[in-house]
Amino acid sequence: MAEAAVISKGSEPGKGISYLKAFITLKKGYIQSTRLNYEIKAFLKGNLAPDIVIREIVFLDKLPKTRSDKLLLRVLRARELGIPGGESLNMQD
């Protein structure tokens, strides 16, 4: 991975399990695949915490950022929820 951003997709009541969606850019020379998707999920689950579940992974060419190179998580959340604020000139579809 070159960069990653994660947003919450909610949690399962009573179980304490958080469901997340990851947005990932890959280093040059790597291509997205089902196997890579599985390996990333397994790595994150094994190295972060057992109660975190990466439900979805989306591979992007570029993550939305400010001019000072800070990630714009609000843009990713807005796009995911289909609400205003999901526009960014710095993001490729």
Image (spheres, rainbow, N blue to C red):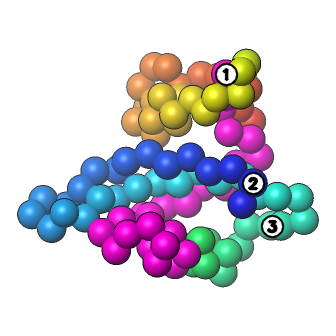
Please name the amino acid that badge 2 sits on. Ala
Identify which amino acid the numbered label 1 is placed on: Thr
Q: For residue 58: magenta?
A: yes
Where does the image place residue 68, in percent across and percent down from the top left?
71, 21
The span shown in magenta is: 42-66
Task: Give the quadrant of the C terminus.
Answer: top right
Disc 2: which residue: 2
Q: Residue 31 shows which numbered tag?
A: 3
Q: Which residue is drawn at the image coordinates 49% and 73% (left, top)? A: 47
Mark 1 — residue?
Answer: 66
Q: Is residue 61 magenta?
A: yes
Residue 24 percent location from the top left of the image: 65, 53
Amino acid tagged 3: Ile
Q: Secondary structure at mark 1?
A: loop
Residue at horizontal 19%, vertical 63%? 16
Q: Earlier in the sequence, mark 2 or mark 1?
A: 2
